[in-house]
Amino acid sequence: MVSSLKFQSNVFIAAVSGKSSSLQKSHAYSIQPIKATATQTPVSVSESSTGGKTRGGINGFGRVGRLVLRVATFRDDIEVVVVDDPFIDAKYMAYMLKYDSTHGLFKGTIKVVDESTFEINGKGDFGADYVVDSSGVFTTLDKASAHKKGGAKKVVISAPSADAPMFVVGVNETTYKPNMDIVSNASCTTNCLLRWPRWFMKSLVLLKV
């Protein structure tokens, strides 16, 4: 479910009383845009102070990021509260979200506010418990840990990682342990290809028995 969602086309920090604070902790009216590059550490996310639904953030609004958001719109237990991407302006982000040649029109209200911001269903705070990092840049434990420093509980990297535990649902997700706060979901190619060879190898073993 998407409600009170604000998109940022740059990486933002909040300036409050002369001090920097986390993007997700602040309200929309206190946010000041700061240009960022892909090599900069992503902004930290503060733990949500709102109970109820699981509140998540998405870092990187490419194909994976947009699909994560679309799936969340059909979930009553998930609320995406912020998405940021340093490479795409708000108008193009809104366009890509609204029109999808595979999944059709986005079912929601999208309003472009300015060149760096567009909103879905109004404004709200940016408290996020879970972050999906689909930027393709912050793929190591060290870089992805920036999301946790502000209070986010878990981070899922939607790309292969050199040092984070990697899981593919249907293959090895049963080996996940609750103390793994940063994990990788491997690559889209791996998710597409890995399941059927595993099933095939299982079948061969059964045939040999």
Image (cartoon, grey):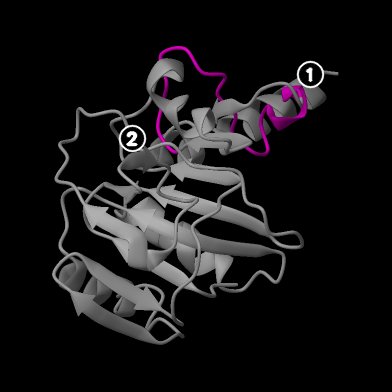
Can you identify the residue that label 2 sits on? 42
- Outermost residue, top side: 163
Q: Amino acid at mark 1?
A: Lys
Residue 35 makes an appearance in the image: yes
Question: Residue, x 28% and y 31% (percent of image)?
Answer: 137
Asked if one can make out residue 184 in the rendered structure from this viewpoint, the answer is no
- The magenta stretch is 158-177
* Residue 184, percent from left and from top: 51, 29
Q: Is residue 87 left or right of residue 200?
A: left
**Left or right: 162 in relation to 1:** left
* Mark 2 surroundings within 10 Å by alpha-carbon count, few (fewer than 14), some (14 through 19), many (20 or more): many
Upstream in sequence: badge 2 or badge 1 = 2
Under mark 2, the amino acid is: Pro
Question: Crowding near pointer 1: few (<14 within 10 Å), some, many (20+)?
Answer: few
Q: Circle 1 sits on which residue?
A: 208
Residue 139 in the image: state x and y as whole percent: 38, 26
Q: Relative to the observer, which residue lies in front, 170 or 4? A: 4
Residue 201 horizontal/vertical position (percent): 66, 25
Mark 1 and mark 2 in contact (Cβ < 8 Å)? no
Magenta stretch secondary structure, dominant:
loop
Q: Which quarter of the figure is the C terminus placed in?
A: top right
Tell me if 124 is positioned left or right of 8 in this view.
Answer: right
- Residue at point 63%, 29% (across, down): 198
Outermost residue toward the right?
209
Q: Position of residue 119 (x, y in %)?
A: 35, 75
Relative placement, left or right, of 124 versus 138 is right
Closer to the eye: label 2 or 1: 2
